[in-house]
Image (cartoon, helix red, strand yellow):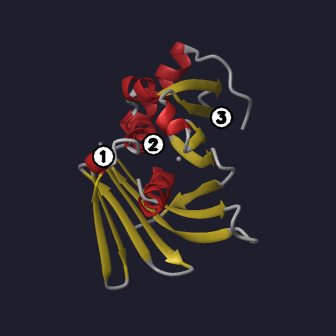
């Protein structure tokens, strides 16, 4: 898979999502996923910090995230420059200025689990999460953390873990640690009013 495709998937996946992980408590995890599944739409602000070992300073961006159940995710970056990433029905579309690039996820099967980490969490789809990841839940419904560790060796060579934190049906942070040491933290802000 090309580095560009992975970067696009990482950026988009950040659109969707603190405490030490413990063994999954089935009732608590199920309750959380049921709560998340009730949310059919979301439109929030975000800030993102990416730390890449090849750069001396972190990359910072901000904008808006949109979600429509079960599988439409859109990330509209406003700063430092406008860019839109849209994942819908297994197709990723990136637009920057007059340039558009389209990728079918079926052409990048090693990335599907990574995208599923966000989509399945937002959709409350435990079976999909456990198909691709070891899932650890910690905290309570009021303050929770999900830690997702890839089961498949191919994905584990790229992504070390995805940590998603929130309160009840609201996701507050999505932290992605890559196996090469790069990391990103997406902080989800307040709802954007239409």
Near mark 1 (Cα within 10 A), the count class, few <14, some 14-19 or many ≥20, is some
Q: Is residue 137 left or right of residue 21?
A: left
Structural distance between the alpha carbons of marks 3 and 1 = 25 Å
The residue carrying mark 1 is 71
The residue carrying mark 2 is 114
Label 3 element class:
loop
Structural distance between the alpha carbons of marks 3 and 2 = 24 Å
Contact (CB < 8 A) between labels 1 and 2? no
Structural distance between the alpha carbons of marks 1 and 2 = 14 Å
Q: Quadrant of the C terminus?
A: bottom left
Residue 162 makes an appearance in the image? no
Q: Nearer the viewer, residue 56 or 34?
A: 56
Residue visible at 69% across and 50% down? 181
Q: Earlier in the sequence, mark 3 or mark 1?
A: 1
Residue visible at 47% across and 29% down? 152
In this picture, is 167 found above or below 193? above
The image position of residue 187, as x and y in percent, is 61, 56
Disc number placed over residue 143 in the picture, else none: 3
């Amino acid at each position: 898979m090309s580095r560009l495709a992975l970067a696009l998937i990482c950026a988009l996946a950040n659109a969707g999502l603190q405490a030490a992980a413990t063994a999954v408590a089935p009732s608590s995890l199920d309750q959380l996923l049921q709560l998340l599944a009730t949310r059919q739409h979301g439109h929030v602000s975000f800030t993102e910090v990416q730390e890449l070992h090849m750069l001396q300073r972190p990359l910072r961006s901000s904008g808006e995230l949109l979600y429509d159940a079960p599988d439409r995710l859109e990330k509209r970056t406003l700063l430092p420059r406008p860019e839109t990433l849209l994942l819908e029905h297994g197709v990723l579309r990136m637009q920057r200025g007059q340039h558009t690039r389209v990728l079918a996820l079926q052409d990048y099967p090693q990335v599907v689990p990574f995208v599923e980490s966000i989509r399945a969490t937002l959709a409350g789809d435990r079976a999909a999460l456990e198909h691709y990841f070891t899932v650890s839940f910690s905290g309570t419904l009021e303050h929770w953390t999900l830690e997702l560790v890839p089961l498949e060796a191919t994905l584990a060579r790229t992504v070390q873990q995805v940590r998603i934190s929130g309160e009840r049906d609201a996701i507050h942070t999505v932290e992605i640690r890559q196996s090469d040491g790069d990391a990103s933290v997406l902080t989800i802000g307040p709802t954007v009013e239409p």
